[in-house]
Image (spheres, helix red, strand yellow):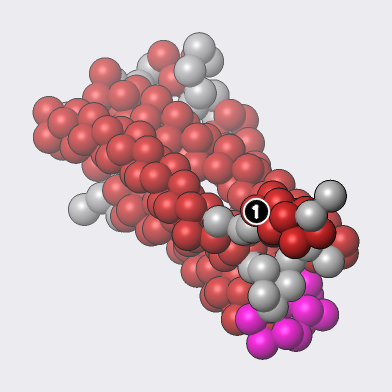
Amino acid sequence: MDTSLHITSQAVHTRRDDEGKRMGMWLFLFTEVLLFGGLFIVYATYRYLNSEEFHNGSARLDWVIGAINTLILLTSSLTVALSVSAVQAGKMKKAKILLWVTILFAIAFLINKYFEWGHKIHLGIFPGMDGFKALSGGESLFFLLYYFMTGLHALHIIVGVTFIGFILYYMKKGEVSPDNYVLHENAGLYWHLVDVIWIYLFPLFYLII
């Protein structure tokens, strides 16, 4: 058997397509933008038709919790970016620590959201409950959109944490390294999108004036 042919064949099978992976992630993120973009259009339409009721619904939300969660996600976006930079510089231990910090920030966000939703449910402001049925039509639309859009965003947070968990696993196996970090970079891009979506959700629901 020709040894050079065997080596060439191995090289073909082990060739990385980093640009393809990046392009795949950007295409996926584009579909996410379309999803939330459509929801933002729905929100804008109903808010235009029910301006006063949406204002009243927003007044029932705690903007302080929303602001804290905004700060948490912005900081977590920074830690993800610093983690990617650390991998590129070969500082793997630092990169891992930064990813764990990102996960802690994500958990803090979800805990805040849990208590926020829990308080609303305690007051009966949840679809099917008495407090919700007592709302005006516009206010009920506001809270339907609030639960659906912030709930969908929380689901994306969970997916992002899972993604970061896989990056930590691949780091441990040595499959994420200074010369092979595209997967880590893609996880960072996904996390940045999650942050950007919240930056829009926060003023839309919490800061209606």
**In-front residue for pair 155/138:** 155
State the image coordinates of residue 58 (x, y, percent, origin top left): 34, 43
Question: Residue at 67% of width from left, 75% of height from top?
Answer: 179
Residue 57 as seen in the image, left or right of residue 160: left
Query: What is the residue that sits farthest to the front in this orientation?
Result: 1
> How many numbered marks, from 0 up?
1
In this rendering, the answer to whether 37 lies above or below 185 is above
In this rendering, the answer to whether 68 lies above or below 148 is below
Task: Estimate how packed mark 1 is, as few (under 14), some (14 to 19) or many (20 or more) residues with alpha carbons within 10 Å.
Answer: few
Residue 203 in view, yes or no: yes
Question: Residue at 12% of width from left, 35% of height from top?
Answer: 48
Residue 14 as seen in the image, left or right of residue 22: right
State the image coordinates of residue 159 (x, y, percent, origin top left): 63, 43
Question: Residue at 31% of width from left, 24% of height from top?
Answer: 141
Which residue range is magenta in the image? 87-98
Residue 108 in view, yes or no: no
Task: Report the amino acid beneath label 1.
Answer: Val
Q: Quadrant of residue 31?
A: top left
Residue 12 as seen in the image, left or right of residue 47: right
- Residue tagged 1: 12
- Is residue 65 a member of the stretch shown in magenta? no
Residue 119 as seen in the image, left or right of residue 207: right
Q: Main secondary structure of the magenta part?
A: helix
Query: What is the residue that sits farthest to the right in this orientation?
Result: 173
- Is residue 96 a member of the stretch shown in magenta? yes
State the image coordinates of residue 9 (x, y, percent, origin top left): 71, 52
SS for dot 1 = helix
